[in-house]
Image (cartoon, grey):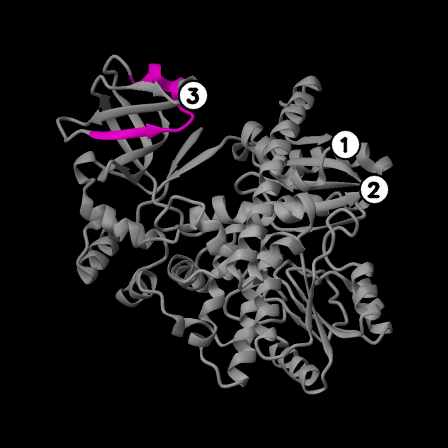
Amino acid sequence: MRWTIKPKPKQEDIDTLANALNVDSLVAQLLLQRGISTFEEAKHFFRPQLSDLHDPFLMKDMDIAVNRIEEAIANGENILVYGDYDVDGTTAVALLSSYLLSYYPNVATYIPDRYDEGYGVSFKGIDFAEDNDFTLIVALDCGVKAIDKVAYAKEKGIDFIICDHHRPGTILPSAVAVLDPKREDCSYPYDELCGCGVGFKLIQALGSRRGETIDDVIYYLDLVATAIGADIVPITGENRILAFYGLQVINQQPRTGFKAIIDQINKKELTITDVVFIIAPRINAAGRMKHGQHAVNLLTETNMDEALKFASEIEKFNADRRGLDQKITIEALGQIQENQEQEGFTSVVYKDTWHKGVIGIVASRLTETYYRPTLVFTKSGDKLAASARSVKGFDVYNALEGCADYIEQFGGHKYAAGLTLLEEQYHNFKHQFEKVVKETIDPQMLIPEITIDAVIELKDINPKLMRILKQFAPFGPGNMSPVFMAENLQDTGYAKGVGKDEAHLKLAVVQQGSHKIDGIGFNMGNKLSKVTGRKPFNAVFSIDENEWQGNVNLQLKLKDIQ
């Protein structure tokens, strides 16, 4: 691993901000590295306010979208809320449908089948709308590239409103309204919303027309916070506000479906990390293993007994998903080693029997292992489908654009994408993808990087610092949990491997006579020899709280040692 220390801001800027906020220079440095340089900016960072959310009508086409929904309600039309089968899509569908149903009955939901219909808007979904007299479809977390599908619906007299956050193509669908902050002609002040976030801006706009304030729709922010965490969008600007208050809703007044999941967990307060690793995988498992509608049912259920049944069902889906992704990961790793491809610039694997619902997770695991842009393919109908994952700094979406001649359809983000292609194009695509990545990637990107915020002394780690660091949350892209480096540490003779097969490293360290502090390094048991015998070493870590038998102590959560 390569360690990269962030540039330290000018000392005069650190001193000025430290004096203005009455904090020490380390905290001022961390804030400046996050682009916060004034008292007012720090106030907004530490005390996010719902009043700072942007006016939803600043988004291109928002007024048109609201007018069309109001027209549909006035005319008694049937409205179909359509969304993708992942966490962002299902939370968005649950959000908009439950909001509309709170005052209008002619609303239904539709989640495409991952295996029968694939990603995004489908012809089958439009046929369903026609057969059931829906004249308006609101698509969430998908649709911005569905040019032929929207045209097909238009021929049938069905209007579309699209709420998406993916990058549009050069031509937009002929929908009534396309809400997407990434549109080049959209001047909305924040363009990193997730799909559920765009859906929230729509209900915020609808509510304002009905005389509602932000307090009337705050209940829906638990869904938005979950989508923000699961979709790995930056937790900056407006997303930070939405995530901050969404976590409050999850912890203080969760919807029945969330409560059914949370009640099975022995945890007092959930962080955004808990949402990502506890709630999101369960919601995702429905679409991966069975059907995304199961997730929508859970998220919109208001009867606890029914919600517990849905949660139990989804728990089983999640257990099945875990077993499958472990099995397929082992097979995929074996395929890479067998073909001796671990030295290339990419990892591309394929087996026609792999479960389409877990190939994205497998791609992530392969990326962690070999740290290469990775694609995992499986058979999907008469085509091949793949999930792509990337490494820090490399835009896999752009790389796929360089392989467009061999691809039927693709979409996604910088670090995660999906695609389909004809089976006979697989080897051509694989060769071209390796070529494009080799020609465009900086070789340094193929070495995992730890970005360090600051070098600190152990003596500076104390409960006051921890209290302030906790206020930096919620953490995520654009505002990661602060990472520190300390030099010339020594173990106190306590270092040992712990856990199954002694996979983890536990130790207690001092630095030039400082107070002793415990440390834990998960999956770092193989580094035990680096710290024994009182050999001095450097460590990279975040600062964590360890609670044991009612006592809370600070500890180093190790990331690497040298």
**What residue do we see at 82% from left, 73% from top?**
154
Q: Is residue 13 above or below residue 351?
A: below
Give the quarter of the figure containing the C terminus: top left
Asked whether the residues under the numbered discs 2 and 3 touch, taking CB atoms below 8 Å apart as contact, a structural biologist would say no
178 lies left or right of 133 = left
- Residue found farthest to the left: 513
Specify which label sits upstream in the sequence, 2 or 3. Answer: 2
The picture quadrant where one finds residue 517 is top left
Q: Which residue in the structure is indicated by mark 1?
A: 353
Q: Which mark is residue 240?
A: none
Residue 209 location, x and y as percent? 54, 85
The magenta-colored residue range is: 517-531
Asked whether the residues under the numbered discs 2 and 1 touch, taking CB atoms below 8 Å apart as contact, a structural biologist would say no
Q: Which mark is residue 500?
A: 3
Specify which label sits upstream in the sequence, 2 or 1. Answer: 1
User: Few, some or many C-alpha atoms within 10 Å of disc 1 (few <14, some 14-19, many ≥20)?
Assistant: few
The picture quadrant where one finds residue 506 is top left
Residue 280 location, x and y as percent? 53, 49
Q: Which residue in the structure is indicated by mark 2?
A: 383
Amino acid under disc 3: Lys
Alpha-carbon span between mark 2 and mark 1: 13 Å
Alpha-carbon span between mark 1 and mark 3: 32 Å
Residue 197 visible (yes or no): yes
